[in-house]
Image: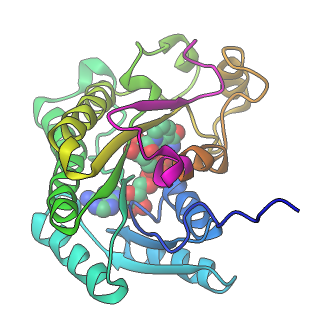
Amino acid sequence: MPPTLPPLLKDKVIVVTGGAGLLGRAFCQAISDHGGVAVVADVDAAVAQAVATGISIHGGRAEALPVDITDASSIQALIGAVQSKWGRIDAVVNSAYPRSQSWGAKFEDVGYADFCGNVASHLGGYFLVAQQFAVYFRASGGGNIVNLGSIYGTQAPRFELYADTPMTMPVEYAAIKAGVIQLTRYVAQYFKADGVRCNALSPGGIRDRQPESFLAQYASHCGATGMLDPADVAGTLVFLLSDASRHLTGQNLIVDDGFCL
Ligand SMILES: NC(=O)c1ccc[n+]([C@@H]2O[C@H](COP(=O)([O-])OP(=O)(O)OC[C@H]3O[C@@H](n4cnc5c(N)ncnc54)[C@H](O)[C@@H]3O)[C@@H](O)[C@H]2O)c1
């Protein structure tokens, strides 16, 4: 009989910002499924609590805590609460998705204040979480940061896919996600000697009630699947959070069923 391997995330305490979101809740579930403790950290405390309860009633370990990623004192309070309850933090996943009211406007209609506001809350928030956690990790002997990027942080938008839909690919998103991927390299390099690693995970489009015609167009650029479900991306996150990737830092892993090729 081959030896039974321990779960990939056995007893790791992992904070997921935006843990109540579409991807965040799948990430929290996967963390719990692989033996870890998922801290569902979100500005929406009620949904975060529902996610944590849903995991716990099926025997997993999860806890909901409030956080606003644009507020350093809120991030500090989160770190303090997790540290005092669980005695450790192994990793943080930057998966929150702040957007302004006007998010999704056409390029010509994006105002300066909205552009700057979205870059500040999303890219700025990811910076703040990475900064606050990296300093904590350095002081506690090491840690792991995963930032959510996107295919649209690495390649030009395929605008033709959106032509017959009310959707677009916002200009802020391109700037934010390219920034997140480069922020990832910066943090990885800055903390390389401190046992703190930092990687980006860049999903392609995630299935979320988009029109069928759009899904078909999108799928024509992909392999067998097209748009992915959140659970399709979670396996790569588990790898990045696990010791199986312990020598991987400063990288961006694209999970998109071949869309970018
Ligand atoms: N959904 C996709 O198709 C897709 C594709 C590629 C990358 N991504 C990236 O994945 C990440 C998660 O996306 P999603 O689709 O799960 O988003 P979502 O909108 O479903 O969830 C985002 C969560 O972030 C929370 N949030 C918003 N502002 C916050 C703040 N200031 N502080 C803390 N929490 C805050 C929201 O309450 C929400 O629960 C984002 O970085 C997004 O850009 C998403």
Eyeballing the image, is 80 above or below 25? below
Between residue 23 and residue 185, name the one nearer to us.
185
Residue at figure coordinates x 34%, y 54% from the top left: 144
Residue at figure coordinates x 59%, y 28% from the top left: 256
What is the magenta range?
Answer: 239-261
Asked whether, in this view, residue 63 is left or right of residue 72, the answer is right
Between residue 185 and residue 106, name the one nearer to us.
185
Residue at figure coordinates x 56%, y 83% from the top left: 53
Eyeballing the image, is 66 above or below 151? below
Q: How many numbered discs sit on the rendered protein?
A: 0
Question: Is 242 included in the stretch rendered in magenta?
Answer: yes
Asked whether, in this view, residue 133 is left or right of residue 58, the answer is left
Residue at figure coordinates x 27%, y 80% from the top left: 83
**The quadrant where residue 87 appears:** bottom left
Task: For the N terminus, give its image quadrant.
Answer: bottom right
Where is residue 113? Give x, y as percent.
11, 36
Where is residue 35? Give x, y as percent.
60, 71
